[in-house]
Amino acid sequence: MRNYRYISGRHNAAYSIWQRVSYMIIVSFSLLFFYSSCGTPDGRFRIEGRLNNINQGEFYIYSPDGGLTGLDTIHIADGRFSYEISLTDDATFIIVFPNFSEHVIFGRSGATAKISGDVSHLKEIEIEGTDENKQMTELRKHLANQTPPEQKKSVLQFINDNPSSIVSIYLIDKYLLQAEKPDYKETYTLVGKLVKKAPDNARLLKLHQQLGSLKNFSDSTRLPDFTATDIEGKSVNLFSLKSELNAVLFWATWNSESYGLISNMQRLKKDYGSRLTILSVCMDAGKGDCQRRAERDSLKWSTVCDEKMWESPLVEKFAITDIPCYILADKSGRVVARYFTLQELREKIEKTLGEKEKQDK
């Protein structure tokens, strides 16, 4: 009898423990299901994914249209990563991989963008999670094997079919405004047609306004009259640009393409001295990173950072639609070139001032 009671007691105790364990398992799965079904809450946007052939590492992320302030870092552990931020309006994000290749991601409140692929084949990366990201992934694959004229035709077709899409605005900038020789009149006309189809799209309206200042660009165009205060508290204006050649540079610490700009311009300034005046406009949301970069690199020119990013009056005055942007003008203020590659900028300066006439520092 005692043995029976002892065994029965052990059985009841084991059964009680099993009940508790079962309850905990059920609760855990219920919570997991609950959070999985909820997804990303409204007001938040998440980027998550898994990449093959990488265990640990990091890459950068920034937003050209205000979805994110400055440059941020996404860490990879065991090939996986997850990144979440506050987001109310649709926004464009650019991921910069260690080899400086970039991929665009379109964010939306309450959505999750999922990235998958292989780091050794970054061009084949899949980005899903929203209609816009699926569309861009499909279009990117479609454009991969096309010639530049074919790409432009495909891009224009997409834009006309999706006039109010945030993807279309990105494509206008990427394939039309960043072209080797952008046709501002053509792009202005195209954006004007899109505005008629989507009159409430604030970004299209802003872009159309900016292009209005560029559509008549020619060699007779002159620098706009402006006044600003640099990060040292000094006033700069149009009359500050009276050298043989004057370069106005728009850049940001969070923009990967701006990285080589500063070092190249430093070398050119060292070579040509007072014959080359440089004014740089930093598009950062705060002066801190800009000042640290200027101090670290010992910049020998005025740098303006009014902390307004794309809402800066200088962006409107100079009709800037993308960064980095380079504008060259002669001593009379006549614009001689703008919107070209860093190599073309360097070649233009060297050709104009003459390598043989470089000044000693």
Image: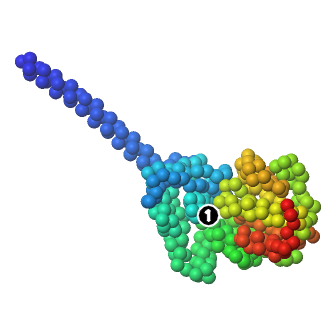
Mark 1: few/some/many CA within 10 Å (<14, 14-19, 20+): some
Say which amino acid is labelled 1. Answer: Ile
User: Is 19 placed left or right of 207 in the picture?
Assistant: left
Residue lying farthest left?
A: 1
User: Is 135 placed left or right of 298 in the picture?
Assistant: left
Residue 72: where, in percent of width, then height? 61, 50
Quarter of image, res 140: bottom right
Q: Residue at x 87, y 72 (%)?
A: 357
Residue 91 visible in the shown view: no
Q: Which residue is mark 1?
A: 166
Quarter of image, res 228: bottom right
**Quadrant of the drawing holding the C terminus:** bottom right
Residue lying farthest front?
A: 360
Residue 313: where, in percent of width, then height? 81, 57
Residues 332 and 357: in front is: 357
Q: Residue at x 70, y 69 (%)?
A: 195
Quarter of image, res 225: bottom right
Q: Residue at x 83, y 60 (%)?
A: 279
Residue 318: where, in percent of width, then height? 81, 64
Residue 74 visible in the shown view: yes
Residues 349 and 136: in front is: 349
Count of numbered marks:
1
Give above or below for 184 relative to 53. below
